[in-house]
Image (tube, helix red, strand yellow):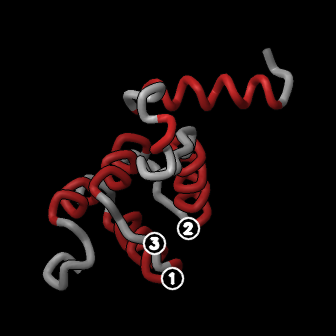
Amino acid sequence: MVDEGEIPVMAAYQVSYLDTESQNTLLRYLEETETKLTIKLAQKIRENFSKNIPLSAEKIEKFIEYNNKRESKTISFKISREKLGRFSDAVPDDETIEKLFLEFLAERFSMT
């Protein structure tokens, strides 16, 4: 899978620390779910699973879901500077936009 470019070399390196059975289980899971193994995910799997504890598809799925939830704590959206045109003097940078947006939400939903 590394030769075909489906898995980054460094991700494969991280997975190599797992026992053979766990490696095979992980690869089957990735193929069946069409999940991409990133270097970051491979590192987390290596850090959280040892050679003494074989992986199961269920463990992998729960682990990936848990990590996705932890990583999705940031919300981002885009708004063009063009749309902010008439406010450009009052909104000099992104930090100010974020601060104003949070103030708006607090006021709009009475969370002050």
Label disc, if present, on residue 32 of the rendered structure: 1
Q: Nearer the viewer, residue 94 or 38?
A: 94
Cα separation between marks 2 and 3? 12 Å
**Circle 1/circle 3 CB separation < 8 Å:** no
User: Which residue is under mark 3?
Assistant: 35
Q: Tell me which residue sits at (84%, 30%) in the image.
A: 109
- Location of the N terminus (image quadrant): bottom left
Cα separation between marks 1 and 2? 10 Å
Q: Nearer the viewer, residue 64 or 74?
A: 74
Q: Residue 35 location in percent, x, y? A: 45, 72
Element type at mark 1? helix
Of the residues shown, which amino acid type is indicated by label 2? Ala
User: Which residue is under mark 2?
Assistant: 57
Task: Judge the density around disc 3: few (<14), some (14-19), many (≥20) Cα neighbours within 10 Å.
Answer: few
Of the residues shown, which amino acid type is indicated by label 1? Glu
Q: Tell me which residue sits at (58%, 26%) in the image.
A: 100
Image: 68 above or below 8? above
**Circle 1/circle 2 CB separation < 8 Å:** yes
Q: Tell me which residue sits at (50%, 40%) in the image.
A: 86
Q: Nearer the viewer, residue 44 or 25?
A: 44
Residue extending farthest front:
86
Q: Residue 55 location in percent, x, y? A: 48, 59
User: Picture quarter containing residue 73?
Assistant: top right
